[in-house]
Image: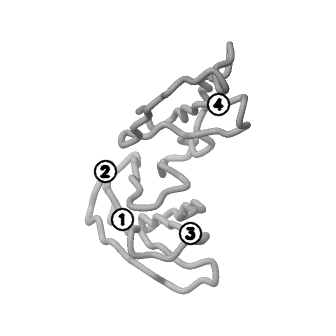
Amino acid sequence: MQPNLNVYLLDRLNNTKQQFTDSLHLVFTATNATADRNRFMIVFEANKNILSTSPLQILVYPNPASKSIQVLYTNQVDAYTTITISSNAGAKIKSINLGKVKEVKEVVDISKLARGVYYLQIQNGTETKTEKVVIH
């Protein structure tokens, strides 16, 4: 999946929306009771976390997530960079030192975190960006 695009399967009969992920496996079984023309629709939406015009750019996906998130980071110059995850109450949960980097793709394990809202912060010495992350 492209990180700047969310793809969903919309079930019009059950009024549900399922996000496609790399690990999603769908099985369809049609019955007379559930068969309907145009029941399913694939919806493409731009990810709301698309990179900005700032020199420090980050993209966090998938969001919401349950096992891991990927963090894409780019900057105009090499800079000592740290990723910090904090709880909704502000408590520091995890910190990852990326070293002196210009760009990186980091997979962050969140499988041991409780469900809820967290904040992922990237600092590079001169600039800080924060993204809200939902764990379900």
- Report the Cα–Cα distance between label 2 and label 4: 33 Å
Q: Is residue 53 visible?
A: no
Query: Is the N terminus in the top left, top right, bottom left or bottom right quadrant?
Result: top left
Total numbered badges shown on the rendered structure? 4
| Displayed quadrant of residue 11 | top right
Label 4 sits on residue: 10
The foreground one among 53 and 4 is 4
Residue 10, horizontal then vertical, whole percent: 64, 31
Q: Which residue is mark 2?
A: 104
Three-letter code for the amino acid on which mark 1 is drawn = Thr
The residue beneath circle 1 is 81
Identified by mark 3, the residue type is Tyr
Q: Residue at x 26, y 66 (%)?
A: 99
Q: Is residue 18 visible?
A: yes
Lower position in the chain sequence, tag 1 or tag 3: 1
Real-space Cα separation, disc 1 to disc 4, in angstroms: 39 Å
Q: SS class of the residue under badge 1?
A: strand
Q: Secondary structure at mark 2?
A: strand
Identify the residue at image location x=40%, y=45%. Answer: 76
For discs 4 and 3, the disc positioned in front in the rendered view: 4
